Amino acid sequence: MNFIVKKFNELTTVELYEILKSRAQIFIMEQNINYQDMDDIDYRSLHCFLWENNRVVAYLRAFYTASNIVKIGRVLTLEHGNGFGKKLMEQSLQEIKSKMNPSRICMHAQKHAASFYEKFGFQVTSDDFLEEGVVHVEMELL
């Protein structure tokens, strides 16, 4: 398994296709979220993913929102309980800090996953809110 970090214009067409396929599998097919996944933010994102057997098995993207604040989004793993999520978060946070040098790192996390992100130093900074029909909370790395 390889951990890969690339800007949009560095992705191969196969990598991009597999990223979009994994995002559709999790967010559209499994979680039944009806939304426009390709939102142009990908163009300005740092894409972090685990590549195994010619597919993306875990993924997230990171992008600047304002000033020097980085937001993490589209976090997924195709399989749970195998450590892919932990590996993805640990290595991605290192890369985001070194490549993007953010003043803050934040995210809109699905509420059920907040305890997972807390293991990496994130803390909930908002009340619950709906995003694409799913309960989320704002979180910030402290």
Image (cartoon, rainbow, N blue to C red):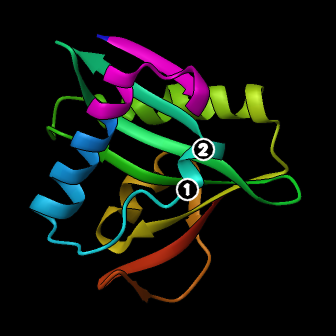
Q: Horizontal and vertical percent for residue 92?
A: 54, 31
**Image height of 111 relative to 15, above or below:** below
Q: Are marks 1 and 2 in contact (CB under 8 Å)?
A: yes
Residue 140 placement, left or right of 35: right
Q: Horizontal and vertical percent for residue 46?
A: 60, 36
Name the residue rendered at 47%, 18% in the picture. 4
- Element type where label 2 sits in the image: helix
Q: Horizontal and vertical percent for residue 31?
A: 16, 66
Name the residue rendered at 37%, 34% in the picture. 86
Q: Quadrant of the C terminus?
A: bottom right
Stretch of the chain drawn in magenta: 2-18
Return the residue at label 1: 40
Q: Which mark is residue 117?
A: none
Residue 22 placement, left or right of 66: left
**Image height of 23 relative to 57, above or below:** below
Between 33 and 121, the one nearer to me in the picture? 33
Q: Amino acid at mark 2?
A: Tyr
Return the residue at label 2: 43
Q: Horizontal and vertical percent for residue 80?
A: 16, 41
Q: Quadrant of the N terminus?
A: top left
Name the residue rendered at 24%, 75% in the picture. 34
Name the residue rendered at 73%, 33% in the picture. 97
> Is 97 within the magenta?
no
**Image height of 45 relative to 33, above or below:** above
Between 86 and 45, the one nearer to me in the picture? 45
